[in-house]
Image (cartoon, coloured by chain):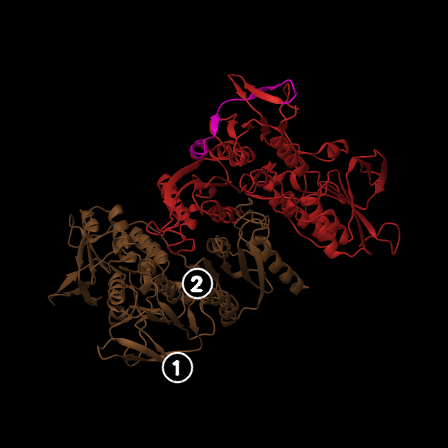
Chain colours: A brown, B red
């Protein structure tokens, strides 16, 4: 191991960002190298570390009683592990040539340079804020950080009204809509597309719409919020789309996130088409021997399409951090990529997807077959069996599995893992028909729904090959 | 296609056995070939076709209200599909050289020969009945067929007493014990091993014991029933083990099944070490061009150990039937083998296994690492998260996944499918650490329990490789 500053002096690792990727990297590096070998300095501009952003909707909705439950590890706990964690300290510049970062105390404004031997960039993502009048008015909330969640809860506590508008019908939008219904709000979701959950094909999204309507949520499709109106108190009072106006005591923005890579961009580090940092298999920033990046600020390889994507998801961030920590610590680990698995729920309806949608397959220039089947989560005769719809895409000539979407009752969401593993192993749908999946009446029909879909897809591929 | 009996005459397919494998084969063959091309004659010695034997414990326990719910397709429904189904007709001889079977009407005793062009043997399995005095007494029940289940229910209705002894603590034993508890019985399970569920390693079986004890079930270990005592009415009144005696108003035998291959044996067809028929990939009986076999009467290839096994499970039987029907109908399909996946539950405790146990790995001459981890079914902060224990075996030098056992609350059982697919794809535990599994707080911690186990196993393999 090469040491900077001469024999006996520890190397210094600097981590930018105190959430999942950054602190996982720091913790794993610490497990591999003691403080005598590796000094670790981490900068976090916010007030929290290692929190579950994915849990915010459940905290807002009341399923999770308090904010602290969402924090996996507090600043103090990190410090006990010999990580020099500087909270409310924002890195404002990366000097790649000089191997140093400039950080600024958010409260005092004081800034200084910190040299590094190794650098981890884990700056996360920032919510997309629509560029329109009133977007920054009180009562309009993003839900990316715990501070955002707290601000939303405070805002809910302050308003008397009970009308909420959620902008966007992706994971965050849908989960926040449910959370607000649980809080007793009349919820309107303004959706740019024709169906909610654009990460599904529209025919599957339609099933999600049905569940949302069933909860009393008003769905406004093909619409964009163009303006936010404020009342005399300056707070939001309504939003306008191109066609209509909707009263709103609170507005939640759930239109997605972008990689937070302004620092990296300024430093001249390589960014991809989606604005995320580009790394190699070991999560090292391309072309930079001693800089790693992970979490919501990087692009990842989609193993199915072979293209880079940006996916903000805690589970990837944790894996990135783990891999970076191993590599920083002198070991070797890789993050080969993703297959695009995501799960969620609306009320009792579970929603899952992995791999390519039809749109993605077309965009990748693939010819494909698609099948959709209905089955049940348990043997039909077993009490509590719920309906499950499985859509499967297979490449036309090879029969290779391309993607699976599942919407249904209990047991639907995690069934997508079968397809996630099969995609990783590049299985054909024909091979999938023989999978030895768990069967017992309380857990599956004798043909698991995924097998039913695989059989039907395999038959289509066979028929097409004739 | 070769035709017997000259141009224009249909071939005849004879199927022995009217349950999952036989009738799936017949139905699939019929879908591929109409009655003008293929005549299908099926013999079933019992009163039911295509029933779910796996559902019997839930019918006995009262979760499934009536027998008919367990029947996927009745004799009439099969006949409507142009299958000449002969119920209560037992095949007593296969004349391989003469291409014919002799069948006997169970009620009248009348017998006759039926020629075949193609033959499917799907004779199932028979429960092992202990060879001891009183084993055939009224009140002692197997639970293999719907008739068995009905006999047990009738027997329960007839007895006043409320004490039941279950012999065996495998899937059937454990499920029947729960069923009898649900019926209000005081249940004693007599188990040959030290822990219930010998398909798990004993350390995991211990978790099942705890759940059974929690339900008030008395567990008698290291014990075999050596004698059944009958009362003045001739019915069972108690059983004896080598050490003790247990009062019993009803006794349920759950000590496993053997392939029902006496017909095949007499006909000189090839049987394996476990007494099951041996087939090729296409489920054709080895060395016999026009005879197929599937379901509980065959041995299957274990893809992990490379050895033949006997596994009686409806999901395999259905797949076999499907494959046979495709091949009989002139297509081509294969059943590559199994990885040994099985799931079950006791009360709210879910139980799952796939691949090799420690015992199997040793027997196969493999060196292995083993890890056991505890995690939760959902994010720890999400309501309803339940504990889950995952044990994972990996080959020591290669890191190849060898097996997984999971015991835990809701969501534990079907998680084993992740490992089932990984085993099929011959993944290493290192490769598994990068699997893109579904994550959202209601469905998984940020590291799915299977990933936690894979990480720990990969670390052990790495450490061992140094």
Q: Magenta stretch? A: B209-235
- Kindly identify which numbered label has been placed on residue A302: 2
Name the chain under label 2.
A
In the rendered view of the protein, which quadrant contains the N terminus of chain B? bottom right
Residue furthest right as drawn: B6
Q: Residue at x 71, y 38 (%)?
A: B123
Q: Under tag 1, what secondary structure?
A: loop
* Viewer-side residue, B404 vs A323: B404
Residue furthest front as drawn: B160
Picture quadrant where residue B308 is located = top right
Q: Under tag 2, what secondary structure?
A: loop
Q: Residue at x 35, y 69 (%)?
A: A254
Magenta-span inclusion, residue B230: yes
- Kindly identify which numbered label has been placed on residue A244: 1
Give me the C-alpha separation between circle 2 and circle 1. 39 Å
Q: Earlier in the sequence, mark 2 or mark 1?
A: 1
């Amino acid at each position: 191991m090469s040491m900077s500053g001469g024999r006996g002096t520890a190397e210094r690792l600097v981590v930018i960002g105190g959430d999942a990727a950054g602190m996982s990297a720091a913790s794993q590096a610490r497990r591999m190298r003691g403080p005598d070998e590796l000094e670790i300095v981490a900068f976090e501009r916010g007030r929290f570390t290692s929190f579950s952003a994915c849990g915010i909707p459940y905290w807002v909705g009341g399923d999770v009683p308090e904010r602290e439950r969402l924090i996996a590890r507090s600043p103090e706990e990190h410090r006990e592990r010999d990580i020099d964690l500087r909270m409310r300290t924002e890195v404002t510049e990366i000097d790649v040539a000089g191997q140093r970062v400039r950080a600024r105390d958010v409260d005092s404004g004081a800034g200084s340079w910190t040299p590094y031997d190794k650098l981890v960039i884990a700056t996360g993502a920032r919510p997309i804020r629509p560029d329109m009048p009133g977007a920054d008015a009180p009562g309009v909330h993003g839900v990316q950080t715990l501070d955002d969640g707290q601000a939303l809860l405070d805002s809910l506590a302050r308003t008397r009204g009970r009308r909420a508008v959620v902008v966007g019908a992706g994971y965050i939008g849908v989960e926040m809509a449910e959370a607000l219904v649980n809080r007793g709000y009349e919820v309107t979701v303004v959706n740019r597309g024709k169906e909610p959950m654009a990460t599904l094909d529209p025919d599957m999204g339609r099933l999600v719409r049905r569940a949302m309507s069933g909860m009393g949520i008003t769905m406004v499709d093909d619409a964009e919020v163009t303006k936010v109106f404020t009342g005399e108190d300056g707070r939001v009072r309504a939003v306008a789309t191109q066609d209509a106006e909707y009263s709103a005591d609170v507005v939640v923005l759930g239109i997605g996130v972008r990689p937070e890579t302004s620092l990296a961009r300024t430093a001249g580090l390589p960014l991809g088409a989606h604005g995320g940092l580009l790394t190699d298999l070991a999560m090292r920033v391309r072309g930079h021997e001693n800089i790693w990046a992970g979490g919501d600020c990087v692009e990842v390889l989609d193993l199915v399409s072979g293209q880079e994507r940006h996916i903000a998801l805690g589970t990837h961030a944790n894996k990135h951090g783990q891999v970076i920590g191993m590599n920083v610590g002198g070991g070797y680990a890789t993050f080969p990529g993703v297959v695009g698995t995501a799960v969620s729920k609306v009320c009792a309806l579970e929603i899952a997807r992995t791999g390519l949608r039809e749109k993605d397959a077309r965009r990748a220039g693939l010819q494909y077959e698609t099948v959709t089947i209905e089955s049940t989560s348990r043997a039909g005769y077993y009490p509590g069996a719920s309906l499950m719809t499985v859509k499967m895409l297979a490449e036309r000539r090879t029969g290779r599995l391309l993607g699976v979407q599942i919407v249904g009752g209990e047991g639907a969401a995690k069934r997508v893992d079968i397809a996630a593993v099969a995609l990783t192993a590049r299985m054909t749908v024909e091979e999938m028909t023989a999978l030895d999946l768990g069967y017992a009446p309380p857990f599956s029909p004798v043909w698991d729904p995924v097998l039913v879909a695989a059989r039907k897809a395999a038959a289509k591929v066979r028929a097409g090959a004739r």
